[in-house]
Amino acid sequence: MTATEAARLQAPATAGSDTRARILDAAFRCLASNGYAALSVREIAKDAGVNHALISYYFGTKDRLVIAVLDEANRRLLQRQREMYAAPGRFADKWAQARRFYESDLASGFVRVQAELYAASLSNDELRRQFVPRVQAWKTVVLEAVRDALDTYRPRLPAAFDAEAIATLIAEFWLGMEFARLIGDDEEKARHEKALDAVEQLLIALESGPVRTGPTHDTG
């Protein structure tokens, strides 16, 4: 009998959903602390307090495990973002809330986990195929928020500055900022904060300005 087969016999007695959750939590902690390259199934099992064969039983491979870790985090974080943007209120306030979420995600280790998987995906085709749609799901939330903001403020912009272009600029800046923050210094952090402040001030100015009833984009 293999270790995985033994784990299958053990699994029903271990409250499966709780065991799976403990493995995911442990894998998240190990990813955030040690990174993808140093990720060890045995260390995860030790942290979770389970037989290491149970990881193969529930997830099969290391890559499936880390994608499950990302899915579990994304499920909560994307719902948090959607609820925030769907709620009534000023977009400047929502931007400020998004910044607080960002600081929370840095503290929790989520930003490190995402950066580790992003880097690992560069040389792992299978992981990349799984990872990219997960990042795209967040970018879609950003795009929906930008469309809502443009519909609300109707600013006169060059035609090239449509919702997709603006959402791409925001999303790619945010991802780049996250990665730079992980390895950057206080001066770089200050520059990022200044840029985030500028966007918040722009949203406040749009909120305070007259309501525009003309076309969203400047066609001149």
Image (spheres, grey):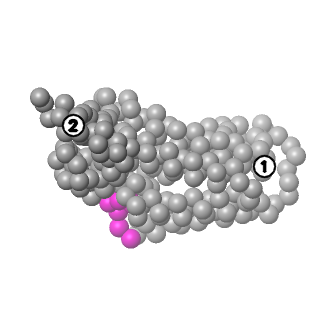
Badge 1 element: helix
Q: Which residues are magenta?
A: 180-186
Residue type at mark 1: give it.
Thr
Residue at 73 percent of width and 60 percent of height: 90
Q: Local crowd at mark 2 within 10 Å, few (<14), some, or many (≥20)?
A: some
Q: To which residue does mark 1 refer?
A: 152
Label 2 is placed on what type of residue? Answer: Ala
Viewed as shown, does residue 176 lie left or right of 27? Answer: right
The quadrant of the image that shows the C terminus is top right
Q: Quadrant of residue 146?
A: top right
Q: Is residue 13 left or right of residue 201?
A: left
- Examine the structure image and report whether residue 183 is included in the region drawn in magenta: yes
Q: Residues within 10 Å of mark 1 (few under 14, many from 20)?
A: some
Identify the mark at residue 7; answer none if there is no mark: 2
Which residue is drawn at the image coordinates 37% and 58% (left, top)? 109
Residue at image position (23%, 39%) is 10
- Viewer can see residue 205: yes
Which mark is in front, 1 or 2? 2
Residue 122 place in picture, x, y as percent: 30, 36
